[in-house]
Amino acid sequence: MTAVECGNDIVLLDAGGKFPEESQRGIDLIIPDITFILDRRRNFRGILITHGHEDHIGGLPYILPQLEQKGEKIPIYAPALAIGFIQRKLEEARMDDKVELHTVKGGDRVKLGQIEAEYIHVTHSIPDACAVALHTPVGTIVDTGDFKFDPTPVMGKPTDERRFKRLGDDGVLALFSDTVRVEVDGSTPSEAVVLETMDEEIRTAKGQVLIATFASNVSRIHMAMLAARKYGRKVAVAGRSMEQNSRVAEELGYLDNEDGLLVSLEELNRMPKEKRVIVVTGSQGEASAALSRIAAGEHPKIRVSRGDKIIVSATPIPGNEDTVSHTINNLFKQGTDVVYSGRNRGVHVSGHAGRDELQKMIRLLRPKYTVPIHGEFRHMALYRDLCVETNIPRENVMLPEIGGVIEFTKDGAGQKGRVPSGNILVDRLGDRGNPQTVLRTRENLTDDGFVVVTLILDRSTGELVAGPYLVGKGLSKDLNNGALKEAENELRRMLSRQKDGSPLYGFIVQRAKETVGRALYRHSRTRPLILPIVTEL
Amino acid sequence: MTAVECGNDIVLLDAGGKFPEESQRGIDLIIPDITFILDRRRNFRGILITHGHEDHIGGLPYILPQLEQKGEKIPIYAPALAIGFIQRKLEEARMDDKVELHTVKGGDRVKLGQIEAEYIHVTHSIPDACAVALHTPVGTIVDTGDFKFDPTPVMGKPTDERRFKRLGDDGVLALFSDTVRVEVDGSTPSEAVVLETMDEEIRTAKGQVLIATFASNVSRIHMAMLAARKYGRKVAVAGRSMEQNSRVAEELGYLDNEDGLLVSLEELNRMPKEKRVIVVTGSQGEASAALSRIAAGEHPKIRVSRGDKIIVSATPIPGNEDTVSHTINNLFKQGTDVVYSGRNRGVHVSGHAGRDELQKMIRLLRPKYTVPIHGEFRHMALYRDLCVETNIPRENVMLPEIGGVIEFTKDGAGQKGRVPSGNILVDRLGDRGNPQTVLRTRENLTDDGFVVVTLILDRSTGELVAGPYLVGKGLSKDLNNGALKEAENELRRMLSRQKDGSPLYGFIVQRAKETVGRALYRHSRTRPLILPIVTEL
């Protein structure tokens, strides 16, 4: 999330959520702290969204209630597909009446006080992605969003190079650039590579084909449909977010289902195996998503066996390697053939620009200043080197910090202190889909105390070797030993109901959190932080 | 570790230790359970080691005391460099008098009862690696060890293809094969690629050059020395295991130091920066190794700054991605230029055979049966497919299980039950280098109870947000609340002594374990399992 302030006008660029790392157990989602905006609420003009990925829209349901002011709807601008996803998300959270959604496309301009935002079409791994140029009295700032220069995108047009070139001709003050693939020389392969691979894998498949990808990856669903149509198969999607997103994409015309290619999972299951393609969630090995449940033989509607092919059309996000690897091993144990990026690089390509493409963007825009965003420190440092190679003076490359302020004036630019900022930790109560959440800052993290849940499992059989043991600190006085004991027993019963199969670490972590959290809430109406610690031996 | 039994003779092939995964916190090393051997102790003829990597020799100090019988030394056979590493390791553990070390090389044969073991030279990422052919009355079993067909190894000769071919001509009953790179098409690049990259990176470096690699990777130290000599630099090594291994390698003639190229770190530090090459441990981001301490600005003898270059000559082992990434970010924050596999693929190549090489080995040996070893389930499943492609009937590919028995007779082969097996968990007491350890099985895991240590840190500043809190279960009665409180205070003091810099998750986990373990042992002479749970927010 970037806030751009110009005189008395502030706009927000994107509103993502990020998933916690392994060492942040007990937390479900992390969203940005928007105290800075709340302190200047009357200057706030709206939110500009570049595209519909979770890390750009996932924070909205948690940010909007904070921004709410009576009688005033919050303006959100986004390309059509992102608007579709946002609408669904907000309906679910019963917040759709709090916003005013505006669909924009490449070439559109939106006036927000002194700031004029211009959308520019780019290619990414989702259709309808845009960069945003903010025209201000001191100059133009371009935020690339997530992009690559894909010459043969499978959906939509190539990146609007001409417009970037013209912006460069007119003069760009600052370029805020995607950097996540700055480590990789050359250009990122086209999505067309994935289409070819998927075509080939579906052509040669004998049984069911499952394709695991991100729920928002409409383009991969589209590819699965193209190949399925060609080889006489039908397509269903599985996983709640995948079903919702594909419905949105179909309604908006991004998925062509005129010939009834897309059917329900129930209908697909009545067809012979060699006619089936199922697109599922869980490409990151997420414990509660379809793929890992299928891998563990626990999915209520999807069973796989020898002769079936599973295509994992994603690469593990750093930190998820273990769970993805665990899921793939389980799928092989079911006798299926699994095609994943470690085996076949063509099953996935990145949506982000490689080094040459990042350099091309700098050359098109010829900005005075550059600001690497969306990367880890090493990405920012390497992007700075790339800028220097491309004749941007080193001192004109600003490495931003979370909460850091960069001020641009007519005379120059500089880093200028910090504003309140940081991570807000979203703690979801209980079961999936339950909209009840707690927002925690570092300061109020342990206001209700916390409970450590210790479980020691046999890695091979999944049996409990020791535990569960609950120990609490700083809890409400309603949570006496009896209450903890009761929660402990509930968790033990839940675990004993587990079906056979290799234990899924993440699944147990999540279930432990839900079961214990619910039991303690019932007793005390307090929400201690639950820290599950599962040791597999 | 593989045990081969033939009549009344049993030999062990390799004796590795493996490092715990993230979910096995509280454990330092995992070694195989050798109950099966102990039950047949008088039939045990010795240990055959294929090469000197930790995952092939690291279990020896824990296994040997179990195998010990008074008056009898345990025979260990291994190539020269591995013997050097083993000797050092056993001297340190004061076990060198318990063994009888035999140096062997490619072409050598060792008679162990009815089994005749033949060593065959292969290439790997360490010099002096061998495969072992076990000639038995029912036929010949070949264990490849870890290998690749490197046509231009930087140290030593190429793999002895002729011998494998001749073994194939004579008839091979079973091939036990390395499989870890079966996912990758083609052949693994030669070590010569790394030499070229290192040469180029050192040639173009302006300040200090640091090269991080595994302590046993003598070949990379050799490459660093070749390049340093060429460009007028001197070389020092840092990190305890690296110092010991390089000394062994120098004494055995694997590293050529006749011209005094290799100097002490103190001596190197007196030379100008542009004359220095330092080879360090910590390429996996291990918290206590040199590289992560340098990255955090905490190394007592090595400081880095802008103008220095760090070459990480390794890829993260699955599960270590986060710590490696954290270390690389920290190094960039110090202003250094970091060259790692994500940026430059030439800094590291695997030591394991790719798919074509695995197939080549099958074609050379034409075994009746194959057994994939050393991989995860997906590697074994893919190796089975590869065997089928190479005309081995599917039913002749045996996927082994830990503890599973495969019986070969004159008439055939089959999987035949299980023997006692599993993981023994090594829990080291306190500080590094302290030889005191506890071996735990799943059953006795919590015999002394356990203590959960909870710490919540601010990710950006490393400050304690909450904790440490110690809570115990099933502890000795000597460990009352006062004792826990005292340990808690000690840990708090230790953490407050921490220097500035981004917190290192693993470092804190380890220190918490050491501090608390030591305090509790002092009170009770018991060794509860310490489970540190660090949440970074």
Image (cartoon, coloured by chain):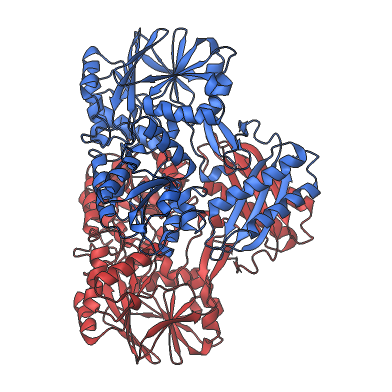
Chain colours: A red, B blue
Q: Is residue B522 left or right of residue A23?
A: right
The residue shown at (70%, 54%) is B469
The residue shown at (32%, 30%) is B384
The residue shown at (63%, 45%) is B514
Q: Is residue B124 left or right of residue B377?
A: left
Give the mark count: 0
* Residue A265: % across, % down: 39, 51
Q: Which one is nearer the viewer's eye here, A82 or A254?
A: A82
Which image quarter is the C terminus of chain A in?
Answer: top right
Q: Is residue B445 above or below residue A533?
A: above
Q: Is residue B335 left or right of residue A259?
A: right
* Residue B160: % across, % down: 24, 24
Q: Is residue A203 above or below residue B489?
A: above
* Residue A220: % across, % down: 30, 57
Q: Quadrant of residue B124?
A: top left
Q: Is residue A107 left or right of residue A430?
A: left
* Residue A253: % across, % down: 29, 68
Q: Quadrant of residue A396?
A: bottom left
Which image quarter is the N terminus of chain A in?
Answer: bottom left
The residue shown at (21%, 15%) is B169
Q: Is residue B392 above or below residue A490?
A: above
Residue B189 appears in the picture as rendered: no
Q: Which one is nearer the viewer's eye here, A332 or B149?
A: B149
Q: Which one is nearer the viewer's eye here, B238 or A233?
A: B238
Residue B403 appears in the picture as rendered: yes
